[in-house]
Amino acid sequence: MGILHHPIARNIRRKPLTVVAPLAVIFMLYLFLFSHRDSSKSNSRRTASKYSYKQKNKSWFNKNKDSVILRNLPKNHLSHYDLNQLTVSSTPLENKEEVLILTPMSKFLPEYWDNLNRLTYDHSLISLGFILPRTEDGNVALRKLEIAIKATQGNPVTKFKKITVLRQDSNSLESQLEKDRHAFSVQKPRRALMALARNSLVFTTISPSTSWVLWLDSDIIETPHSVIQEMAAHDKPVLSANVYQRFYNEESKKNDIRPYDFNNWVESEEGLKLASTLGEDEIVVEGYAEMATYRPLMAHFYDHNGDKNTEMALDGVGGGAVLVKADVHRDGAMFPSFPFYHLIETEGFARMAKRLGYEVFGLPNYLVYHYNE
Ligand SMILES: Nc1nc2c(ncn2[C@@H]2O[C@H](COP(=O)(O)OP(=O)(O)OP(=O)(O)O)[C@@H](O)[C@H]2O)c(=O)[nH]1
Ligand SMILES: [Mg+2]
């Protein structure tokens, strides 16, 4: 009797489902078990080690996804950085230290960009980071910024190492008119949102090779061209320049300068007393008659004939032009969007840096200039 005439074979021919169905069930079971086995394994492993490496299954039908990822990575995909080798010194150019310039940007000013292009620090050691609000102002600024970046990066003389442009995921206040953004009542929400923007910016752009972070507002249109070398020479963890403004003095009929940023200050007895009367969620904002703190303001310490390297210890800083050792941020100093010792944003940052044990300084005779609208 041939094999095809065997009773079992005859049975299969007549009712193929009797064989195919159990086989299909076994096959499904196999797939089911394989796709679950590894995840259950790594779940039990997770209790032992918080950062267990989850292996993907290696069944015939499911390619090992890890190997696919590894294959797609560029050659030396594994990078080791010894942060102990990262120098942050008073001679950053000689040590080829990398600087990250960070700018929250609600408007693009060509003068700001020209000033940036003229910095004498080696541009191949400078990375730039921007964060723009998702408002109409932000759209306009983004278009102008992109055009400017193209021109700068296309020129080997001005080309920066890397440029990152972020679009904010948090909200912004709609009106950026001078009178609106300076109103006392709007300071807490406005500066809380600015703090979120600054945090997003620094946390997404700082790299293992960043030695210094220079915070430079988009309306700072003039700095000394060697601002990085000159400020770094002071070797301070946090160092703020004095923000002034050029204007035409109607009285003297001459071009003149005047103090602009009042957020660089030294804490006062009155300031502390005032803070102690505030509720947990209230903040002190500097430069408002509604809240007289009598804090010594660095803006008023400028001496035209003084040494531009004069230093003064500060308790609060603004964001105009502040050079920060990247380790201060790496250690966790950020811009609180909530009242931190009754301070927020850049002033809260100075407080946090101090709580982390870093000294905060300012240069009263070292001027940078704010745009005059
Ligand atoms: N990403 C982002 N940046 C902003 C926003 N509002 C302002 N900026 C930028 O943040 C920096 C500080 O903002 P300013 O409006 O100059 O605030 P300020 O320096 O406290 O006040 P002024 O005295 O008006 O200059 C500037 O570089 C602005 O371009 C915003 O909503 N989102
Ligand atoms: Mg400003």
Image: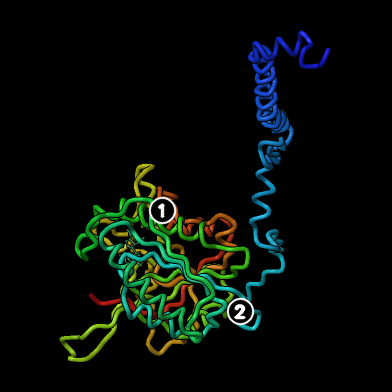
**Callout 2 amino acid:** Pro
Image quadrant in which the C terminus is located:
bottom left
**In screen coordinates, is 122 left or right of 246?**
right
**Who is closer to the viewer here, 153 or 260?**
153
Name the residue beneath numbered marker 2: 92
As measured in the structure, the alpha-carbon distance from the residue carrying label 2 to the one carrying label 1 is 29 Å
Name the residue beneath numbered marker 1: 196
Q: Are marks 2 and 1 in contact (CB under 8 Å)?
A: no
**Please, what secondary structure does the residue beneath circle 2 have?**
loop
- Which residue is painted at 55% across and 62% down in the image? 206
The answer to whether any part of residue 184 appears in the image is yes
**Please, what secondary structure does the residue beneath circle 1 have?**
helix
**Who is closer to the viewer here, 144 or 306?**
144
Q: Quadrant location of residue 13?
A: top right
**Who is closer to the viewer here, 65 or 350?**
65
- Which residue is painted at 29% across and 76% down in the image? 371
The answer to whether any part of residue 188 appears in the image is no
